[in-house]
Amino acid sequence: MTGRHAAEGARRVQTRPPRVRVSVLGPVRLAVNGTPVHLTPLTARLLVRLVAAEGETVTARRLYRDVWQQTVELPHQDLRNRNEVQKRILELRRAFDRAGPGHGTRIVRTGQLPTARGAESTYRLDLSDEELDSAEFTRLVGDALHAAPASAVRLLTDALGLWRGRPLAEAQDEEFADATVRRLNRLRETALRELVAGHTALGRYDLALPVAEETVRERPDDPEAAATLARLNARLRERHGDELLRHTLRGLRVDVVVLRGDLFDQEDANLVVGFSDTFDTFTDDVVISRESVQGQLVDRLFEGRHRLLDAALRRGLKDVTPLATESVREKRRGRRTRYPVGTAVAVPVGKRRVFALAYSRLGNDLRARSAPADLRLSLERLWPTVARYGLFKPVATPLIGAGLSRLVELDRTQLLLLIVETFTRSLGQDPAICPELRVVIRADELERTDLSAVEDFLRRVDERGPAFPPTGIG
């Protein structure tokens, strides 16, 4: 066998599940070759007693006193007691022998201790870390204490995953188990504390929070645990700000977020801004209101110079075939070239993009009009444009259709659902549209928006996957 093949073989051996697995972080369990093995109550207590010795030898006399809970020593009882212990030791070895001949004597080792009465039999367990969960737990936590945060989090998560309840549960509050139980419980407290610290160092306050909450539930009088939880809650409030809903789509690692705020404060995200089919930009409060999203776009990202935005839009529209160009007589104010509803133009603004989306028609009476079908079509055409030109940045959008387009057929909740539904549907075709869809809602819009309906919808998306039949909106 070559060196490379030998190394691969060694790795395969190391990753193979152990033939014997003793679990005492909770009610005692024994599994051999992956199959649970039933032990009688006395034999189970004997196993727990030997685990509590942590590799040290225990005399047969002491085993009988602790396991059988003998309180009075009767004359001539020693031989009968030794026979009882040997009977249970034999039962335990037979259980281990199911893993293969010799496992029983390899794991449950017998020795002799010279005493004034003569040699006395002793017993001890010889289990590897992989064969005993409390030993594996101890090793994992020890390794984590010397690891970098990302590795520490993985090791501590694996360690805490081994716990099923009170360690050495069959021993209850007996003296022989006290030291081991105290050590394991202190080590678990350390693991919880370090896991919170690891998640925090990695900026994952959302993952640190449930661990901190568990620690406080278990130690309600610990001021340090309470202070850690308070700091985490403060950091999460600071991070989320006015975030109202966050849902990570299962299997896609894409977040859908709803927050209360200002679209133009989302400086880390590409923006979506709704336009009419003429892509007007002049904020004269006749064609375009200064208070509209388009008006704020001109003022806040183009310093009030609408011609800069006009030039960027012309560059983006050069490959789009217009529907028509009207005469001055037909349309006295505003731009006269009309583009198809659903046209989406990526406008570079620094290192991000503003997606100008034509979802309404501007009549010659200067009133913008749209319908649910127009909005659906526009959104369906928006997301592929975001995927192509969005540089895989988060994308923030207002509640499109809630403004002057007079889309009265849909309420705020239906508008929000339509945005989210078309986005999740597009993920079925291209899961790399963007890492986060952020819908920014004004405070005055929020009271008329039912976010629980959005949560229910997103849960159904997780159940069905991103591609599913239309909801009937629009």
Image: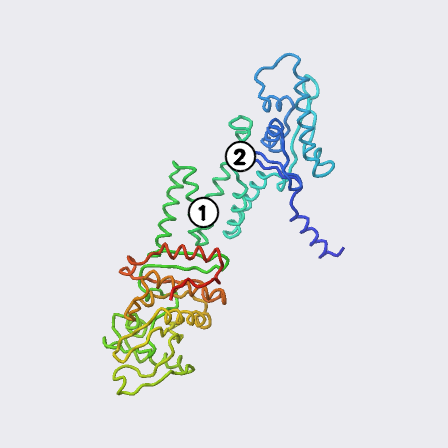
Neighbours of disc 2 within 10 Å: few (<14), some (14-19), many (20+): many
Residue contact at pointers 1 and 2, CB within 8 angstroms: no
Q: Is residue 237 found left or right of 197 in the rendered image? A: left
Q: Where is residue 474? Give x, y as percent.
A: 38, 67
| Residue of label 1 | 196
- Residue 225 location (% of width, % of height): 40, 41
249 or 144: nearer the viewer: 249
Residue at label 2? 167
- For marks 1 and 2 on the same chain, the one whose residue lies earlier in the sequence: 2
Q: Give left or right: position of 377 versus 449.
A: right
Q: Nearer the viewer, residue 397 or 426?
A: 426
Q: Taking 122 as reference, is 403 left or right?
A: left
Q: Residue at x 53, y 39 (%)?
A: 164
Q: Residue furthest left?
A: 285
Q: Quadrant of the N terminus?
A: bottom right
Residue 391 occupies quadrant:
bottom left
Callout 2, which amino acid?
Answer: Pro
